[in-house]
Image: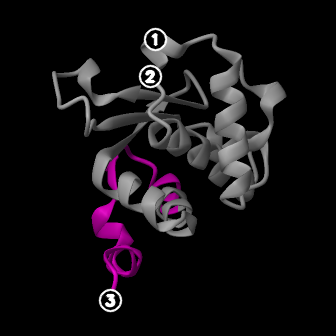
């Protein structure tokens, strides 16, 4: 059995989620379960998901905003707005979560890449390639 298959079987114990919304945690797990193997392993091993309340739909930051880590194997902090569950359909929520995972997968750093249109174009393209639809794939919604 491949490592990714093991993660898929036990995704709930693999997701690092800091927040209060069990529905959002469930959608995060469902989203990770739909990812290709290499992205699934990154999301399960090196992403921490945090519900941040009512500030943003999503944002991806490198884990070294909290501490210095190995630049070749960073931990990613993915911030999600609790309102996302109230304002979007399930597929759309998954596409936003996949969009943030794609930023980590591509090694994007919001601290240095903010405002670079090519970063969002590449991210939306990858999320579409992963089979997601919705606002996480819409380049016009991301700046």
Mark 2 or mark 3, which is nearer the start of the sequence?
3
User: Depth check: 129 or 95 in front?
Assistant: 129
The residue wearing badge 1 is 112
Q: Is residue 70 above or below residue 16?
A: above
Residue at 18% over, 32% down: 70
Find the distance from the CA under tag 3 to the CA under tag 2. Answer: 33 Å
Q: Is residue 6 magenta?
A: yes
Badge 3 marks a residue whose secondary structure is loop
| Labels 3 & 2 near each other (Cβ < 8 A) | no
* Image location of residue 37, percent across then percent down: 46, 67
Q: Please identify the dominant SS of the magenta region.
A: helix
- In this rendering, the count of numbered labels is 3
Q: Are marks 1 and 2 in contact (CB under 8 Å)?
A: yes
Q: Which mark is residue 109?
A: 2
Is residue 31 in sight in this rendering?
yes
Rendered image quadrant of residue 40 = bottom left
Q: Start and end of the magenta stretch?
A: 1-26
In what element is the residue under mark 2? loop
Residue count near mark 2 (Cα–Cα under 10 Å), binned few <14, some 14–19, many ≥20: some
Q: Quadrant of residue 34?
A: bottom right
Residue 43: x and y in percent read 40, 53
Please name the residue that numbered disc 3 is placed on: 1
Residue 46 or 107: which is nearer the viewer?
Answer: 107
Q: Identify the residue shown where x is 74% and y is 46%.
A: 88
**Measured Cα–Cα span from mark 1 to mark 3:** 39 Å
The secondary element bearing badge 1 is classed as helix
Relative depth, front residue between 58 and 65: 65
Q: CA distance from mark 1 to mark 2?
A: 6 Å
Earlier sequence position, callout 1 versus callout 3: 3
- Compared to 26, does 97 lie above or below? above
């Amino acid at each position: 059995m491949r490592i990714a298959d093991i993660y898929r079987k036990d995704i709930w114990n693999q997701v690092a989620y800091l927040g209060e919304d069990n529905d959002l945690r469930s959608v995060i797990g469902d989203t990770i379960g739909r990812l290709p193997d290499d992205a699934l392993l990154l999301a399960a091993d090196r992403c921490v998901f945090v519900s941040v309340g009512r500030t943003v739909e999503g944002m991806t930051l490198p884990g070294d905003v909290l501490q210095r880590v190995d630049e070749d194997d960073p931990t990613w902090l993915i911030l999600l707005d609790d309102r996302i569950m109230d304002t979007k359909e399930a597929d759309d929520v998954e596409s936003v979560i996949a969009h943030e995972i794609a930023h980590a997968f591509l090694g994007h750093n919001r601290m240095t890449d903010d405002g670079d249109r090519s970063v969002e174009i590449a991210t939306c393209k990858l999320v579409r390639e992963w089979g997601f639809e919705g606002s996480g794939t819409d380049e016009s919604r991301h700046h």
